[in-house]
Amino acid sequence: MTDLLGQDMDNHPDKAGPAGGHGPTAGHGHPAPAATAGAGHTAPGQPSGAPAAPDGPEERRGTATWHARDLLSVAGAAVAAVALTFLLFGWIAPFDAPLGFVVVAYLLFLGVYAVLVSFDENPVAVRDRVVAVLWQSLATLLLVVLVFVISYTLWRGHRALDHLNFFTQDLSTTGPLQPLTQGGVVHAMIGTLEQITIALAVTVPLGLACAVFLNEVPGGYARLVRTVVEAMTALPSIVAGLFIYATVILILGYDKSGLAAGLALSLMMLPIIIRASDVVIRLVPGSLREASYALGASQWRTVLTVVLPTARSGLTTAVILGTARGIGETSPVLLTAGYTASVNKSPLSGPQTSLPLATFFMVASPQKNMIARGFGAAALLMALVLLLFVVARIIGGRGPGELSRAQQRRRAQASRRDVARMSSGTGPLREPRQRPGRRPDRRPVPVPAGGDPHGRRGRSRGGTRP
């Protein structure tokens, strides 16, 4: 068989492959030059129009991976951009604006970086790298601004925060020239707590009810309500304060108080809670509703027992976000709460100060100690808002119906208890055991006179049981 194949290949040398030791002929029977291994050449036995095989395994290209040359490109582009900007502002054009310097340097940085990347990458990769650097630089800028605001507030207010009396005293007996060892913002802390409690008492039931209505009752009226809620999210805070000031204080005749401030804050918190709750309730799987309806539950019982418990974590996040929005408002409180330097525990009568309002008045003072107290109050308010956002982030990290670790442990423990109860025979769901290989006992059972087979008194059911 091998000899026959060899003779056939000798007779037809143009069909011989690499194994035969002969290549294709060119022209008058002369052998063609051997194909080299590389791009643009055709391998022996391969059609001329087919693409060449790759030299090695294809490499996976990572778009989110930074290498040393990428970091060097960024650093080199930054240095070159700053140098060119100095040259432009110092020698070519008589510019001296700091903001213009930063803008020109950033634009030059993007251009130089694109040129450096183009030496090693194709145009598509160059665009990807430039856009990635653009977004990452903007994110870095936002992070730097946030860190600067927090650091500056803490640095200016640490002189007041270092004293315990700042958290336990008010300013009723403290003047602007008094040292920081006297006076505090406890009156503003109490006012903030009471006002935000009033606002939550108004917004939580109304916000959740409105969100449920928007999801469970479709129609034109629901679309109108959703449009109004979306418009209220952009409502200026001063307008909310003016509305409560005109209705509660001017028309109804009430004084400036914590109640009026709480109502003004509720106008700012309500659209936030409605929008966030609406989005969370939409994420509840429709299969849960269908299963509840299949079991015979009504629509509102399904909402109370299925939809709201499933979206509990998201609804909690919505309430916390609304609280963080309302707790830092100043304009509504400025028009409706009034200002006092002493503690007012009654939100129904008399002016009541909150932390934003106390910060506003103390920072406006020309005295350094009072300004330090104002920055201390601002730092306290900022820490409270950041804490609320962190809690909202932790709670809102789970989707609708997703259990936390503690809930999963409790659910597993309850399952083990149920299994143990059913296995021991003490539970109501235990099935009767039957020995393997034994047929059910269907022999006649004698019935006592006037009773059943189990010895209970009553009317006889017959002499046998199935």
Image (spheres, rainbow, N blue to C red):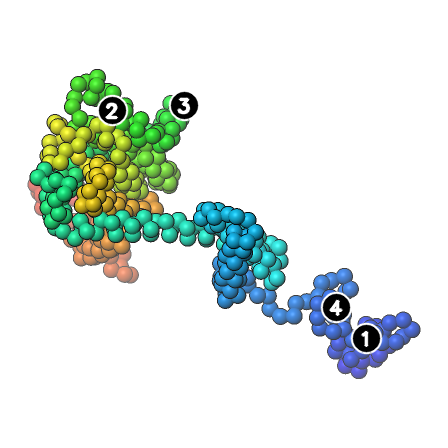
**Any mark on residue 244, and which?**
2
Q: Mark 1 or mark 2, which is nearer to you?
A: 2
| First reached walking from the N terminus: tag 3 or tag 4 | 4
For residue 212, which quarter of the picture? top left
| Sequence-earlier tag: 1 or 2 | 1
What's the residue type where badge 4 is placed?
His
Structural distance between the alpha carbons of marks 2 and 4 = 82 Å
SS for dot 4: loop
Residue assigned mark 3: 220
Q: Amino acid at mark 3?
A: Gly
* In contact (CB < 8 Å): disc 1 and disc 4: no
Q: Residue furthest top?
A: 251
Is 144 positioned to the left or the right of 11 in the image? left
Q: Which residue is mark 1?
A: 33
- Vertically, is 11 above or below 205? below
Q: Are marks 2 and 4 in contact (CB under 8 Å)?
A: no
- Asked if 393 appears above or below 306 in the picture, the reply is below
In the rendering, at what x and y percent does residue 450 appear?
8, 40
Please state which of residues 238 and 454 is positioned toward the viewer in this rendering.
Answer: 238
Q: How many marks do you count on the picture?
A: 4
Q: Are marks 2 and 3 in contact (CB under 8 Å)?
A: no
The outermost residue toward the right is 28
In the rendered structure, which disc, 2 or 3, sits on the residue that comes first in sequence? 3
Name the residue beneath numbered marker 4: 41
Q: Nearer the viewer, mark 3 or mark 4?
A: 4
Q: Which mark lies nearer to you, 2 or 4?
A: 2
Q: Residues within 10 Å of mark 2 (few under 14, many from 20)?
A: many
Task: Find residue 206 and report its horizontal and vertical position in percent.
Answer: 26, 30
Foreground: 152 or 402? 152
Q: CA distance from mark 2 to mark 3?
A: 29 Å
Question: Does the residue at mark 1 contact the one at mark 2 (Cβ under 8 Å)?
Answer: no
